[in-house]
Image (cartoon, grey):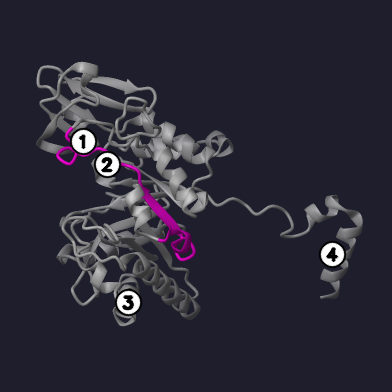
Amino acid sequence: MRSAALFTLLAVLAGPALSAAMPGSGPAAQPSPVIAAYVFPDGTTLQPGQVDPHAVTRIIYAFATLGKSGAIAVANAQDAGNLTLLASLREQNPDLQVLISVGGWNGSGHFSDAALTEESRRAFVRSAIDLIQRYNLDGLDVDWEYPGQPGAGNKFRSEDKQNFTLLLKGLREGFERETERTHKKLYLTIAAEAAEEYLAHTEMDKVRSYVDDVNLMAYDYYVPGADKTTGNSAPLFDSPQDPKQVSADRSVRRFEQAGVPAEKIVLGVPFFGRAWMDVDQQKHGLFQEGKAGPIPYLPYGAIMQTMLGHGYARYWDPQAMVPYLYNAQQKVFVSYEDEKSLAAKCKYAVEHNLGGVMFWHYSEDPSGVLLRTIDLGLRTPAEANSAGAATARGSRGDQ
């Protein structure tokens, strides 16, 4: 104690030069950006080598189910083995975090009931911790789509706004008690709709205190069927021609205004595209009338293999900073993400001090080109210039 006091006194007398040399007295090191990958086997069995533990910092396994009682459980027989495999990847990368996500578009029907009372919230928290313990996971991602809104025909209540906050508060308190017991940090994240309606039905200024990160789903701004005109599914910036005036940048700024600090916002990007049919060729199909085709959802790998160079011409929206495809003969318009637009989003995330980048979902880019773009885009110049940094992971994600 005397040595510490003497050192502090000397630091005060000597000024900034000595203070800078004191242990812990300098500026705190900035955490590495999050690269969060949703892994969605959809009832299939993951194979060894299918997910590269060095390619991402956080794996979010989708999805656990939420029952009528408010209890969380694995969805099918493959989940137990898949979670065991993913948890074992930490042997190769001890810094890797493996979370499980509960809910999703088709799995949020019981959230309103689970969050309704103190008793139901306690049951939810207990089941979450039990699931985390059973599969040796690092935390939970809550993907309620959406509090106070019907989502996919889900039950919802006006009280969801406050109850969502209370549910997350209960999770955080439960996780902290568990950490005191095990000395292992448990992470809590949420998947958030990038829309004003979501902010109107949540208390993000309070939620921010309980979550580690907000995975901002900055995509599906335009969806075939729901939108009768084509548009950019995941624009980075507003386009003057866009009748809806939507973009990732606008959503980020609104979430910040709602109280979420930039460092807790993880920018979501799509590894998929959206397709409309019967689209007029004016403006190469952008912001034109159209309808959902037989395959309105297209993984990036399928777009590269079957569309680009196969009757589809690529165009670029310079304001929104995203690409799109148009097939004049078939009158099909496709909005998607590519290396150029993804590099711009990573640059945006770095320049705006965001927490990192999240993507949906891992297997939709078998080539790994998009994941490598994220890696290069989020690393600092020093990391990028370090010997072998780019080549050491050159084949990651290609399985």
- Compared with 204, 30 (above or below) is above
> How far across and down, in percent of the image, does residue 116 sit?
29, 74
Q: Which range is magenta?
A: 203-228
Label 3 to label 2: alpha-carbon separation: 30 Å
The quadrant in which residue 110 appears is bottom left
Q: Identify residue type, mark 3.
A: Arg
The quadrant in which residue 105 appears is bottom left
Is there CB contact under 8 Å for labels 1 and 2?
yes
Does 204 lie within the magenta span? yes
Label 1 to label 2: alpha-carbon separation: 8 Å
Is there CB contact under 8 Å for labels 4 and 1?
no
Answer whether residue 337 is visible to the viewer in this image. yes
Label 4 to label 3: alpha-carbon separation: 47 Å
> How far across and down, in percent of the image, does residue 172 sit?
44, 71
Number of the label disc, if any, that sits on residue 8: 4
Sequence-earlier tag: 4 or 1: 4
Please report the residue visible at 38 percent of the width from the left and 66 percent of the height from the top.
139
Per the image, label 3 sits on a secondary structure element best described as: helix
Sequence-earlier tag: 1 or 3: 3
The residue positioned farthest toward the left in the image shown: 294
Sequence-earlier tag: 4 or 2: 4
Sequence-earlier tag: 3 or 2: 3
Identify the image quadrant of the N terminus. Answer: bottom right
Q: Identify residue type, mark 2.
A: Asp
Q: Which residue is mark 2?
A: 220
Sequence-earlier tag: 4 or 3: 4
Number of the label disc, if any, that sits on residue 274: 1
Does 4 lie within the magenta span? no
- Compared with 292, 359 (above or below) is below
Q: Which residue is mark 3?
A: 121
Q: Identify residue type, mark 1.
A: Arg
Per the image, label 4 sits on a secondary structure element best described as: helix
